[in-house]
Image (cartoon, grey):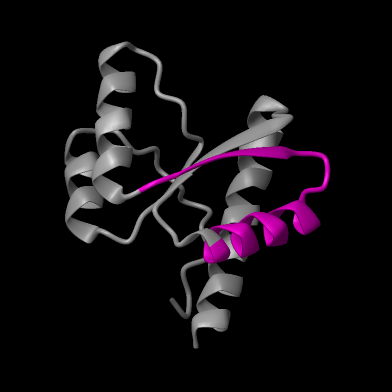
Amino acid sequence: MKTHFIKLLASQLALAATLFAGVANAETLTLYTSQPEADAAKTVDAFKKAQPGIDVNIYRSGTSDILTKMAAEFAAGSPQPDVLLIADAVSMELLKKDDRLLPYPEAKLEGI
């Protein structure tokens, strides 16, 4: 089950990066994640297989550290992550409420 979730998550990350790359011609994607290190490495590896021309900068820490870092970046007017991967639904809802997330209408959500 965990492997299936990681594959599903990696495919969603790859799809998101395709959209980011198409819009911005990105050469680098910045990922902030609270995943355990082994899972984060699998996610990045799966992404790199799908998008070999895009490098990934990863910041991995606990959710509270990530949110503190993002708050400082937003306050400075320079948020860094292209993709945020945390499992805290309450934090995601707060980010959504504060208009800190971009819409992703093309996401393939069937089966999730």
Q: Disc count in the image?
A: 0
Q: Which residues are magenta?
A: 38-61
Q: Is residue 52 magenta?
A: yes
Q: Residue at x 27, y 38 (%)?
A: 67
Residue 93 location in percent, x, y?
A: 20, 50
For residue 68, side relative to residue 17 (left or right)? left
Residue 70 location in percent, x, y?
A: 32, 30
Residue nearest the observer in this picture, 49 or 19: 49
Q: Residue at x 18, y 33 (%)?
A: 98
For residue 109, side relative to residue 56 (left or right)? left
Residue 3 location in percent, x, y?
A: 57, 81
Q: Residue at x 40, y 43 (%)?
A: 103
Which image quarter holds the C terminus?
bottom left
Q: Is residue 39 magenta?
A: yes
Q: For residue 64, what is the image quadrant?
A: top left
Asked if 77 appears above or below 33 in the picture, the reply is: above
Residue 5 location in percent, x, y?
A: 51, 77
For residue 21, side relative to residue 102 (left or right)? right
Asked if 62 appears above or below 87 in the picture, the reply is: above
Q: Residue at x 75, y 39 (%)?
A: 54
Asked if 108 appears above or below 30 in the picture, the reply is: below
Residue nearest the observer in this picture, 20 or 85: 85
Q: Residue furthest bottom?
A: 1
Q: Residue furthest top?
A: 76
Asked if 65 appears above or below 26 in the picture, the reply is: below
